[in-house]
Amino acid sequence: MSTAYLPVISDGLDTYMSQINRFDVLSRQEEYELAMRYRKRDEIEAAHHLICANLRFVVKIAHEYRGYGLRLADLIQEGNIGLMMAVKKFNPDRGIRLISYGVWWIRAYIHNFIIRSWSLVKIGTTQAQKKLFFKLKQTRQALMGDDGQEDSAAIARSLDVRDQDVKEMALRMNARDASLNIELNEESSFTLLETLADDRENQEETLARREEHDNLAAHVKSALSLLNERERHIIDERILSDDPRTLQDLADDFGISRERVRQLEHNALRKMRGSLELPGGFDAATAS
């Protein structure tokens, strides 16, 4: 559903509020008729009318979530998307008002936005975790002791969750993400990023590893040249392949017994060990 006709929050919250307050609240009959027009005839204007008439309720709901440190305008915008989904799914024949049905959608979109914005690392992936996230703050305040200390066991009992779940969620909620580009003090441009260790290989280590790999590859290629075509095929399929085949697979290819393939593989590896001067350096694949 398009948002092209909706008031724009980016023009300023005060301006937005004055715009949405111009829309009259719908009576039950008006709402029903508009909803039926959209549901039966897909009239976008009817849907637009339903949305605009309920935007003020989204603002009221969004205000409930200001304690999470996010811009009210962003919360309203997400709630508006939830309202639009509610209009799309609304069935007026069920006898309930749109906002009574839509409040679930509005809260769901605001909840998901808060979860996404709180941390780059997901703090709530299941419905139970999301519920704990939104209930924990108010429960902590209600059950705070006289000495200002939290009783995590009491909070857990109140929310019907494990004590450990409360402790873990509290730690995650208190550990907000910090930008790596933030300056550590006002007197220099030294950032948090510059305090992190660089675990990457240096150029010398990279070059040495590449040379070692190339040298080993050359030796293996030389050793493979000592084998006949059937032996090379067996080594390729059994030892060098990312998806090794079984002895029985190769026996079926060549029309020989499984034991004969094992003997050919053993002989081929013996030849290669002698060339590479790496006794025991190659072990037969364990697939059978």
Image (cartoon, rainbow, N blue to C red):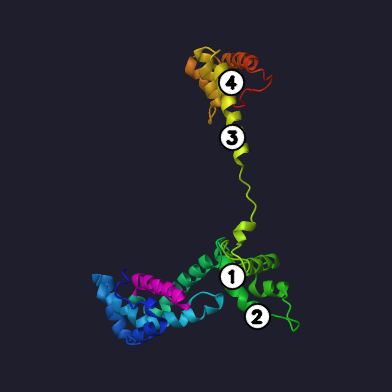
Q: Earlier in the sequence, mark 2 or mark 1?
A: 1
Q: Residues within 10 Å of mark 1 (few under 14, many from 20)?
A: many
| Marks 2 and 3 in Cβ contact (< 8 Å) | no
Residue visible at 70% across and 68% down in the picture: 163
Q: Residues within 10 Å of mark 3 (few under 14, many from 20)?
A: few
x and y percentages locating residue 275 in the rendered image: 62, 15
Q: Which mark is residue 133?
A: 1
Q: Earlier in the sequence, mark 2 or mark 4?
A: 2
Is 73 in the magenta? Answer: yes
Left-right relation of 222 to 17:
right
Residue visible at 51% across and 80% down in the picture: 64
Secondary structure of residue under mark 4: helix
Residue type at the position of mark 2 = Gln
x and y percentages locating residue 45 in the rendered image: 25, 75
Judge depth for marks 3 and 1 and give the one in front.
3
Judge depth for marks 2 and 3 and give the one in front.
3
Residue visible at 74% across and 78% down in the picture: 149
Q: Earlier in the sequence, mark 3 or mark 1?
A: 1
Badge 2 is on which residue?
141
Which picture quadrant has residue 99? bottom left
Residue type at the position of mark 3 = Leu
Badge 3 is on which residue?
207
Judge depth for marks 4 and 1 and give the one in front.
4
Residue type at the position of mark 1 = Phe
* Residues in magenta, as a range: 72-91
Badge 4 is on which residue?
219
Q: CA distance from mark 2 to mark 1?
A: 14 Å
**One can see residue 35 in this view:** no
